[in-house]
Image: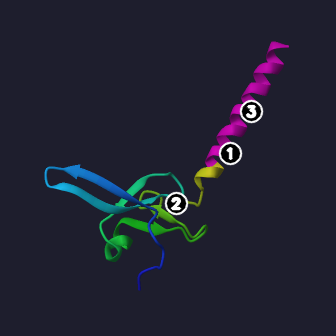
Amino acid sequence: MAPRLKPGGVGQYFGCEGMVEVETSTCAHCQKMTDIPNRRKMQEVVDICRACMKLICLDCAGKPCVPIMKRIEAQEQAYYRRQQLEKLMRS
């Protein structure tokens, strides 16, 4: 049975034969965009994180749950600590 989750957006590709629209999903862990050919094949191209229950790409499947906002917050904290250390070293 397929999950009842909806993909996140619509991708539009323009080529010789005209415009092609596909549903897309953004990975909750790394922000990678994944094209979903149709809802029946959705499980072949994306997975569901069992910790945060969000759609993730196959590259993040099987890895620990680290949502993108946690990564961003960790980078901000590291930057803040580095700035504080540089400020103390200049004093």
The residue lying furthest to the front in this view is 18
State the mark number for residue 12. Answer: none
Verify CB contact (< 8 Å) between mark 1 and mark 2.
no
Where does the image place residue 25, in percent across and percent down from the top left?
A: 43, 61
Disc on the earlier residue, 1 or 2:
2
Disc on the earlier residue, 2 or 3:
2
Where does the image place residue 14, in percent across and percent down from the top left?
A: 23, 50
The residue lying furthest to the top in this view is 90
The CA distance from mark 1 to mark 2 is 19 Å
The CA distance from mark 2 to mark 3 is 27 Å
| Amino acid type of the residue tagged 3 in the rendering | Tyr
Q: Tell me which residue sits at (44%, 52%) in the image.
A: 32
Where does the image place residue 65, in percent across and percent down from the top left?
A: 59, 61
Disc on the earlier residue, 1 or 3:
1
Report which residue position mark 1 lands on: 73
Report which residue position mark 3 lands on: 80
In the picture provided, is 47 more to the left or to the right than 64? left
State the mark number for residue 63. Answer: 2
| Amino acid type of the residue tagged 2 in the rendering | Lys
Q: How is the image coloured?
A: rainbow
Q: How many neighbours does mark 1 have within 10 angstroms: few (below 14), some (14-19), or many (20 or more)?
A: few
Of 80 and 39, the residue lying toward us: 39
Query: Which label sits in the foreground, 1 or 2?
Result: 1
- Give the main secondary structure, helix, strand or loop, of the magenta stretch: helix
Q: Secondary structure at mark 3?
A: helix
